[in-house]
Image: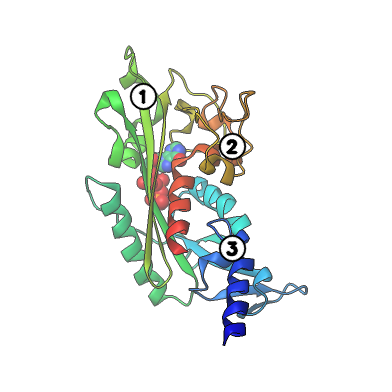
Amino acid sequence: MANQARSSAARRRRRRPTEGPSNPLALGLRFPFILTTSAGRQTQSRATPALVVKRLLFLTGNLGKLAEAQHYFAPLGYRVEQFLLNGKPPEVFEPQADSLRIVANAKISQARKLLAESSEEGAILVDDSGLFIDSLNGFPGVSSASVHSQIGCLGILDLMEGREERGAEFRTYAILWDGEEFVGEGICRGRIIAEERGENGFGYDPIFIPDDLGELSSEGRSSEGGSSDSGTSDMLTSGGRTFAELETAEKNAFSHRRKALEAVLNRLR
Ligand code: ITT
């Protein structure tokens, strides 16, 4: 008995160094996973955790979001795929609402229903995001998608013309479902510049510069972002570059979406 207790304590101790949100083994085996064999065949199994790749279906029509989630999750043992039905993203109804949470909840309800009706297997992910500009009382906020399609970044720059107060933040509300729901929120503070800059990213990325992170916090470190270092080892800065001038890895080091996804994974543990 004592030996048994000692050996299970030893097992617990051995596991501890690899626990944490960046370790897929610590995330539990809540949904079926896929083993890719050396022959490239895929089989469902519960053996050899080192080979585990979990499938995560992201219900989004936004390929920029998809790329960021893929980049974040890949080293953690997840394969993120766009949730498609008959090769197309399904129609999703987004209610008029005054919070990202309500919209994200509406998305996950639809995703769950669609998954149940389909032959797909895996966990599902949704996110609802927006840009909230201080001097515009949080506009465009929850209306970010429709505002972007109507007036674009240039329309926002027009609204900001002559304003000295340039502070703004991106927010993401993410929900992952794998039999139960796990929620995460992320915010990235920054400022709106006076012109569009950069070709990467999507949406409002060309007009937004993230604030420096004063210390290289665990969030900066865990993202493996490759973001610019200001010269001191504990500063994380975009060097005055907009999100659209950063590579995905660099944006993820700062971004609201990566923080929200990280919070989701912390709850999954
Ligand atoms: P879904 O299919 O996932 O709903 P969407 O693009 O409609 O995709 P949101 O409603 O969450 O997603 O996004 C609102 C708007 O904010 C939309 O125009 C996005 O392009 C923009 N946006 C969201 N995240 C962003 C980010 O990280 N950087 C720049 N713009 C972003």
Mark 2 or mark 3, whichever is nearer to me: 3
- The residue wearing badge 3 is 16
Rendered image quadrant of residue 130: top left
Mark 1 or mark 3, whichever is nearer to me: 3
Helix, strand or loop status at disc 2: helix
Kindly identify the residue that appears in the image at 57 percent across and 61 percent down. Answer: 19
Depth order, front residue of 75/56: 75
Density class for disc 1 (Cα within 10 Å; few <14, some 14-19, many ≥20) is some
Residue type at tag 3: Arg
Q: Which percent across, then down, holds residue 222? A: 57, 46
- The residue wearing badge 1 is 167
Alpha-carbon span between mark 1 and mark 3: 41 Å
Density class for disc 2 (Cα within 10 Å; few <14, some 14-19, many ≥20) is many
Q: Which percent across, then down, holds residue 247? A: 61, 37
Asked if residue 78 is positioned above or below residue 166 in the image, the reply reads: below
- Residue extending farthest to the front is 2
- The residue wearing badge 2 is 250
Kindly identify the residue that appears in the image at 36 percent across and 65 percent down. Answer: 181
Q: Are marks 1 and 3 in contact (CB under 8 Å)?
A: no
Mark closest to the chain's N terminus, 1 or 3:
3
Q: Are marks 2 and 1 in contact (CB under 8 Å)?
A: no
Alpha-carbon span between mark 2 and mark 1: 21 Å
Mark closest to the chain's N terminus, 2 or 1:
1
Q: Which percent across, then down, holds residue 17? A: 62, 59
Q: Is residue 85 visible?
A: no
Q: How many marks?
A: 3
Rendered image quadrant of residue 204: top left
